[in-house]
Image (spheres, grey):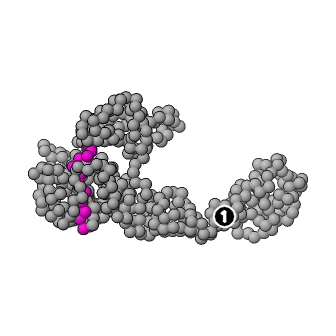
């Protein structure tokens, strides 16, 4: 058996970066940009007003009144000059005319018979957004390798972009194995179960930003297993579930090798998920995951998800880790590290974690109650109220509740 860390090292060293593609801007959201973007112009492109108010010259601020000499709405391209002693009514975003260097908001003036009078002292240069104060022409504004968030999308639009070059989404073929499996929407019977693993994995692939390709179920035969594996090679990665242990009907490893694949490791020192295999076939990574639902999903989190993210250009590929106080004693009497499903909450600024119940690798319900994994070393006990590192599977619990604002 290899350690979790060694398995991750082998996998990541065999997870090649995908090619790039140019897509419409919104399709780049959540993906990694593959090009440096430099600004073609200043933002703002000209000095403009940050407020609705009046623009005038601060050098004439000792005056009692200013004559209103015009109006400049937002979007105006009017080129005008304002004389000393004059002011212009101006809207937010409108260009500052020549002769003006200060804007005073409406609420800080009073109207007179001929114009306006200040009701409070105004700082020279106030309420003007200077040309290029956000971005200067030729600035590197989005660096290759950056994750495109809504703010990057907005900035790229302001630079005139309608498309962006990003790394391709990884296409992941998902194959379940076993005569006991039934298709979705059916009713299970004695000895038969519904193929939930393929859908759990597809959801995990989607959540990571990849494109799942369901290729069905392989029967418990070498011929069926080999045929489905070949079908899966049309994708960038193949994931199989089940058929990777030492049973009479476990044909996945043998099929990969008969097809010319190289098995880089089999069995990882962890619980759940020990019978994980990783192979290369026609330079394509193949993850052979166990068939128990929790073991499948945990193995995906530990090994497949980081690989997918690396292939799609991400530099941050591991889930966040927090230090949490344990609500009960956690004990591992086994000889393998145990990834314990825990529920994490945030209470008065302190993370707290509790066991979610039955830790059987077949018990998917306990995983639905969890949002974190505690790696408990072999032959280890952590007492209640001690702290431990928890890998967070999601951070929704940190968000504010609707009950805080809605009665």
The residue positioned 47% from the left and 34% from the top of the image is 350
Question: In this figure, what is the number of numbered marks?
Answer: 1
Asked if residue 396 is positioned above or below residue 161 in the image, the reply reads above
Q: Which residue is mark 1?
A: 132
- Across and down, in percent, residue 326 comes to 39, 32
Q: Decide if residue 367 is in sight here.
A: no
In the image, is 264 to the left or to the right of 310? Answer: left
- The image quarter containing residue 58 is bottom right
Residue lying furthest left:
248
Which is nearer the eye, 156 or 226?
226
Q: Nearer the viewer, residue 400 or 188?
A: 400
Q: Can you give x and y, in whole percent of width and height, for residue 233 in the image?
A: 25, 65
Provide the major secondary structure of the magenta segment: loop
Question: Is 175 one of the magenta-colored residues?
Answer: no
Residue found at x 50% / y 35%: 349
- Decide if residue 7 is on the left or right side of residue 350: left
- Note whether 342 is above or below 15 in the view shown: above
Q: Secondary structure at mark 1?
A: loop
Residue drawn at x 24%, y 39% is: 335
Image coordinates for residue 107, horizontal then vertical, percent: 76, 48
Q: Is residue 333 above or below residue 206?
A: above
| Image: magenta residue range | 269-282
Point 85% across, 59% down: residue? 59
Q: Is residue 304 left or right of residue 394?
A: left
Instruction: Please name whichever residue, 233 or 369, is drawn nearer the observer in this view of the structure.
Output: 233
Q: Is residue 277 visible?
A: yes
> Does residue 8 sit above or below 189 in this rendering?
below
* Residue 272 x/y as whole percent: 26, 43
* Residue 126 lies in quadrant: bottom right
């Amino acid at each position: 058996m290899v350690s979790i860390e060694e398995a991750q090292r082998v996998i990541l060293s065999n997870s090649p970066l995908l090619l790039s593609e140019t897509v419409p801007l919104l399709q780049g959201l959540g993906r990694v940009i593959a090009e440096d973007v430099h600004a073609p112009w200043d933002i703002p492109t000209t000095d403009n007003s940050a407020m609705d108010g009046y623009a005038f010259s601060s050098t004439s601020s000792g005056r009692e009144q200013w004559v209103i000499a015009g109006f400049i709405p937002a979007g105006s391209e009017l080129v005008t000059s304002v004389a000393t002693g004059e002011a212009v009514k101006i809207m937010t975003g409108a260009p500052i005319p020549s002769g003006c260097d200060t804007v005073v908001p409406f609420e800080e003036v009073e109207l007179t018979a001929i114009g306006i009078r200040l009701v409070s002292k105004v700082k020279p240069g106030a309420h003007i957004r200077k040309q290029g104060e956000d971005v200067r022409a030729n600035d590197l504004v989005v660096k290759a390798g950056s994750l495109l968030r809504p703010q990057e999308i907005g900035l790229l639009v302001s630079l005139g972009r309608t498309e962006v070059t990003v790394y391709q989404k990884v296409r992941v073929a998902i194959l379940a194995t076993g005569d006991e499996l039934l298709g979705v929407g059916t009713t299970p019977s004695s000895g038969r179960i519904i193929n939930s693993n393929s859908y759990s994995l597809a959801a995990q692939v989607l959540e990571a930003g990849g494109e799942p390709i369901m290729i069905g179920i392989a029967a418990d035969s070498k011929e069926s297993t080999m045929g489905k594996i070949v079908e899966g090679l049309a994708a960038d990665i193949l994931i199989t579930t089940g058929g990777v242990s030492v049973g009479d009907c476990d044909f996945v490893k043998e099929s990969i090798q008969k097809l010319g694949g190289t098995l880089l490791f089999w069995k990882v020192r962890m619980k759940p998920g020990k019978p994980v295999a990783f192979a290369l076939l026609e330079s394509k990574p193949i993850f052979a995951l166990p068939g128990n639902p929790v073991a499948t999903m945990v193995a995906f989190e530990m090994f497949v998800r980081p690989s997918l993210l690396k292939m799609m250009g991400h530099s941050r590929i591991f889930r966040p880790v927090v230090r949490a106080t344990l609500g009960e004693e956690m004990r591992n009497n086994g000889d393998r590290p145990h990834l314990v499903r825990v529920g994490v909450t945030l209470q008065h600024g302190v993370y707290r974690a509790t066991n979610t119940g039955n830790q059987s690798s077949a018990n998917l319900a306990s995983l639905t109650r969890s949002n974190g994994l505690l790696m408990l070393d072999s032959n280890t006990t952590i007492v209640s109220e001690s702290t431990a590192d928890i890998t967070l599977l999601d951070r929704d619990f940190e968000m504010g509740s609707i009950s805080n604002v809605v009665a």
